[in-house]
């Protein structure tokens, strides 16, 4: 059985041709699947009965199964989706007055181990397929467009997509680009490139590839103004340091749908939120046309970090604004259902066996004591927790 949901228009045409059908059938199928959210070939009434019967025998339209569907007090809605044995991912819808944003996952888990991120703590299991990525938009649209009785709730509930759910989208490049191309396709979701944003922790070569393959709006998770601190918070920085990352951002802007890159900066109390950090940040991004988005840290059990105090957030923002940088503070949404940035956990069977490695390191420590800070850094334990441990 072929899952048609993840096929590109060209692949769908080839599929139709193999069954002896004309290319325009592919467009009809696209519309039925992505615009009418149909998964039942029987309902596709403008397609001949003979072809529908063939489709039933050879194909499916299948999004991940919904395991849980929760709505927060502020209307934020989170779906927990099954993607195989012991693997679940999360998708979040954030309604606002003038738009509705869907936050989409790209991987089950994440291998990049950013120290303040719940997904990163779980390790990595696998890349999501195109059908699993576009399937999130498919099922959210379907759920939001009608209530149980099929009454429409809103004509166009999802106006924007952000690739900011679980996983590093550029580490699943081909599938993410194919899914985004469906998001942009007029026979599918018809979103403009400005309304699809990809957030990356900074995989420099992949940023260049994205610029050529599918230049959507770009957000980059900076989180620190210098390499020493960024190495700790976003370990991929050891491979692609800030200077290289910023140069890639400038190259990206040549083709980007917006004339700026958004830098995300999660504010961690006492770690990266001082006035000195703010000044250093303003200086370091000065050559990049950018906007800054400050994200108050969203806690999760055992994170070892705390959210910056509101006064610290305001002071930090003011330094950037005085440096003429457009700066916003992200409103935390859906935190009563753990749907805020960095809290998405799902359920991931860690293929990297990171926990086993950590335990092995801890055993080593018993036999040969080392400086707690060095150990903490190696094991990915955040600074704050390491400091507390030292004191305690
Ligand atoms: N892997 C990509 C996209 C997914 S994470 C990336 O890292 O950019 C989306 C955003 O949430 C990133 O900016 C990430 O740094 C941020 N984030 C992760 N954990 C967080 C937390 N606990 N609180 C607030 N933001 C967090
Ligand atoms: Fe992965 Fe992004 Fe989380 Fe880092 S912040 S661990 S890149 S999902």
Image (cartoon, rainbow, N blue to C red):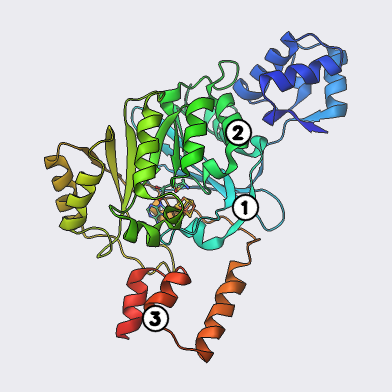
Quarter holding residue 357: bottom right
| Residue neighbourhood size for the residue with mark 2, other residues' Cα within 10 Å, grouped as few (<14), some (14–19), many (≥20) | many
Quarter holding residue 177: top right
Depicted 237 relative to depicted 74: above or below:
below
Residue visible at 40% across and 55% down?
336
Say if residue 214 shows up in the picture.
no
- Mark 2 vs mark 3: in front: 3
Q: Nearer the viewer, residue 180 or 223?
A: 223
**C-beta proximity under 8 Å, tags 2 and 3:** no
**Quick one: label 1 or label 2, which is nearer the N terminus?**
1
Residue extending furthest toward the left? 322
Residue visible at 56% across and 85% down?
363
Q: Nearer the viewer, residue 24 or 218?
A: 218
- Mark 3 vs mark 1: in front: 3
Residue 130 position, x and y percent, is 65, 35
**Quick one: label 3 or label 1, which is nearer the N terminus?**
1
* Residue at which label 3 appears: 372
Q: Which mark is residue 168?
A: none
Residue extending furthest toward the bottom? 367
* Residue at which label 1 appears: 88
Q: How many marks?
A: 3
Residue visible at 70% across and 18% down?
10
Residue 21 position, x and y percent, is 82, 11
Q: Nearer the viewer, residue 147 or 187?
A: 187
Q: Quadrant of the N terminus?
A: top right
**C-beta proximity under 8 Å, tags 3 and 1:** no
Residue 177 falls left or right of residue 296 = right
Residue 371 position, x and y percent, is 39, 82
* Residue at which label 2 appears: 134
Say if residue 126 shows up in the picture.
yes
Residue 326 falls left or right of residue 369 = left
């Amino acid at each position: 059985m072929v899952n048609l949901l993840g096929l590109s228009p060209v692949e769908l045409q080839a599929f139709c041709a193999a069954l002896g059908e004309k290319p325009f059938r592919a467009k009809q199928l696209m519309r039925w699947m992505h615009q009418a959210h149909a998964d039942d070939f029987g309902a596709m009434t403008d397609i001949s009965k003979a072809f529908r019967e063939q489709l039933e025998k050879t194909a499916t339209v299948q999004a991940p199964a919904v395991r849980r569907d929760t709505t927060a007090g502020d209307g934020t809605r989170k779906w927990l989706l099954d993607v195989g044995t012991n693997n679940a991912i999360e998708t979040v819808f954030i309604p606002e007055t003038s738009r509705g944003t869907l936050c989409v996952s790209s991987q089950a888990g994440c291998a990049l181990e950013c120290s303040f991120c719940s997904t990163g703590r779980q390790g990595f299991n696998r890349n999501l397929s195109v059908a699993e990525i576009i399937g999130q938009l498919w099922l959210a649209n379907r759920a939001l467009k009608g209530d149980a009785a099929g009454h429409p709730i809103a004509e166009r509930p999802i106006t924007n997509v952000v690739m900011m759910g679980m996983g590093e989208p550029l580490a699943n490049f081909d599938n993410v680009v194919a899914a985004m191309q469906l998001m942009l396709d007029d026979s599918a979701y018809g979103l403009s490139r400005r309304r699809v944003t990809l957030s990356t922790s900074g995989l420099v070569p992949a940023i260049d590839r994205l610029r050529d393959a599918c230049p959507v709006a770009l957000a980059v998770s900076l989180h620190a103004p210098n390499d020493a601190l960024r190495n700790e918070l976003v370990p991929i920085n050891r491979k692609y340091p800030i200077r290289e990352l910023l140069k890639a951002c400038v190259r990206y802007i040549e083709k980007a749908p917006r004339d700026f890159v958004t830098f995300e900066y999660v504010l961690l109390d006492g770690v990266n939120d001082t006035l000195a950090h703010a000044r250093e940040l303003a200086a370091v991004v000065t050559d990049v046309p950018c906007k800054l988005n400050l994200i108050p840290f969203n806690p999760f059990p055992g994170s070892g970090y705390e959210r910056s105090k509101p006064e610290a957030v305001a002071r930090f923002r003011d330094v950037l604004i005085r440096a003429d940088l457009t700066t916003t503070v992200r409103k935390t949404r859906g935190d009563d259902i753990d749907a805020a940035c960095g809290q998405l956990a799902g359920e991931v069977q860690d293929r990297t066996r990171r926990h086993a490695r950590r335990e092995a390191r801890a055993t080593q420590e018993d036999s040969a004591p080392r400086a707690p800070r060095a150990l903490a850094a190696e094991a990915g334990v955040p600074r704050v927790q390491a400091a507390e441990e030292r004191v305690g």
